[in-house]
């Protein structure tokens, strides 16, 4: 008697945006995924206070972001998932994986993500002179307005076409200061969940050297895929990103016996 896997379903793909962004930043990549893998369930979440998800940005915490992402996953009826996080979404994604557990999370994918050392905050990883300036802008208790186009273009969009830049500019939104200040805890992140890092080589918001430090902070990253693009890879290289993500949402087996 032999046991043969029957390949009958894909895990869902959960996309978590970064700071000053909404779930709509993933739209170009989602469009490519619909073309490449029309059977793949995709949920591009809006974190609280952004897009369609209500929330108080002034008091928002990482735990509340986690609660919201998990709720949106459950509402979509997804069982097994691949969790993808861009930029500051890297603060939330590990706790989402911890909450769902290894039985439901097929893979964690980080795109130009921010991963501070265990027990440290994102602000603590910023060099001191710049940290003081950013800390003043990110005062706890009040939302921070979206960046001006000139700054968003400089840090998020270098190398993009004018049309791609407009996609980024159209969804820029205010940001919550709280997650920048919170110490992160990843002790409960399941070690058995595979980890992939998409490293953006021309990134000005989170330079390649900073991302490599984050990779070391996270640990157990089994593959690093370099992409020669800017910070918002989901807009600048949607076809490349879609192909990578679709491949990591391979058909999942269910047990069946072939007698």
Image: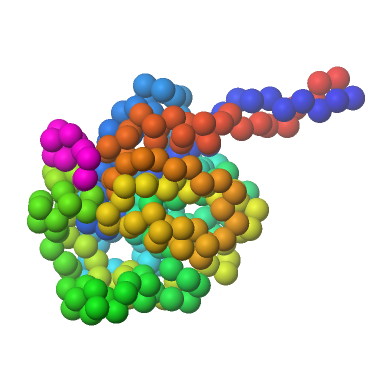
Of 63 and 160, nearer the camera is 160
**Relative vertical location of residue 219 with respect to residue 178 in this rendering, above or below:** above
Q: Quadrant of the C terminus?
A: top right
Of 235 and 40, nearer the camera is 235
Which picture quadrant has residue 147? bottom left
Of 71 and 169, nearer the camera is 169
**Relative vertical location of residue 188 with respect to residue 231 in this rendering, above or below:** below
Of 122 and 171, nearer the camera is 122
The picture places residue 56, in percent across and down from the top left corner, at 22, 66
Q: Does residue 71 appear anywhere in the picture?
A: no
The picture places residue 136, in percent across and down from the top left corner, at 18, 78
Name which residue lies at 68% across and 32% down.
254
> Taking 61 as reference, is 4 left or right?
right
Which picture quadrant has residue 122? bottom left
**Relative vertical location of residue 185 with respect to residue 163 in this rendering, above or below:** below
Name which residue lies at 33% across and 57% down.
206
Q: Quadrant of the N terminus?
A: top right
The picture places residue 118, in percent across and down from the top left corner, at 50, 72
Name which residue lies at 31% across and 51% down.
203
**Relative vertical location of residue 48 with respect to residue 58 in this rendering, above or below:** above
Question: Range of the magenta residues?
Answer: 157-167
Q: Is residue 166 magenta-colored? A: yes
Which picture quadrant has residue 90? bottom left
Q: Does residue 217 appear anywhere in the picture?
A: yes
> Taking 245 as reference, is 135 left or right?
left
Name which residue lies at 50% across and 58% down.
215
């Amino acid at each position: 008697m032999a046991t043969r896997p029957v390949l009958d379903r894909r895990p869902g793909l959960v996309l978590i945006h970064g700071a000053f962004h909404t779930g709509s930043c993933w739209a170009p990549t989602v469009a490519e995924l619909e073309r490449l893998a029309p059977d793949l369930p995709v949920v591009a979440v809006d974190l609280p206070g952004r897009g369609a998800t209500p929330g108080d940005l002034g008091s928002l915490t990482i735990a509340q972001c986690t609660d919201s992402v998990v709720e949106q996953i459950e509402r979509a009826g997804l069982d097994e998932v691949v969790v993808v996080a861009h930029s500051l979404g890297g603060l939330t994604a590990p706790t989402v994986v911890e909450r769902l557990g290894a039985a439901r999370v097929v893979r964690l994918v980080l795109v130009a993500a921010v991963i501070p050392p265990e027990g440290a905050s994102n602000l603590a990883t910023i060099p001191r002179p710049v940290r003081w300036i950013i800390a003043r802008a990110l005062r706890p208790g009040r939302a921070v307005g979206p960046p001006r186009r000139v700054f968003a273009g400089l840090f998020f969009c270098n190398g993009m076409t004018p049309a791609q830049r407009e996609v980024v500019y159209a969804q820029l939104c205010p940001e919550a200061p709280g997650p920048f200040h919170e110490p992160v805890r990843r002790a409960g992140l399941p070690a058995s969940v595979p980890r992939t890092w998409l490293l953006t080589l021309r990134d000005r918001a989170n330079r390649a050297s900073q991302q490599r430090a984050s990779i070391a902070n996270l640990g157990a990253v089994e593959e690093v895929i370099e992409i020669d693009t800017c910070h918002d890879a989901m807009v600048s290289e949607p076809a490349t990103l879609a192909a990578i993500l679709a491949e990591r949402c391979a058909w999942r087996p269910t047990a069946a016996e072939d007698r």
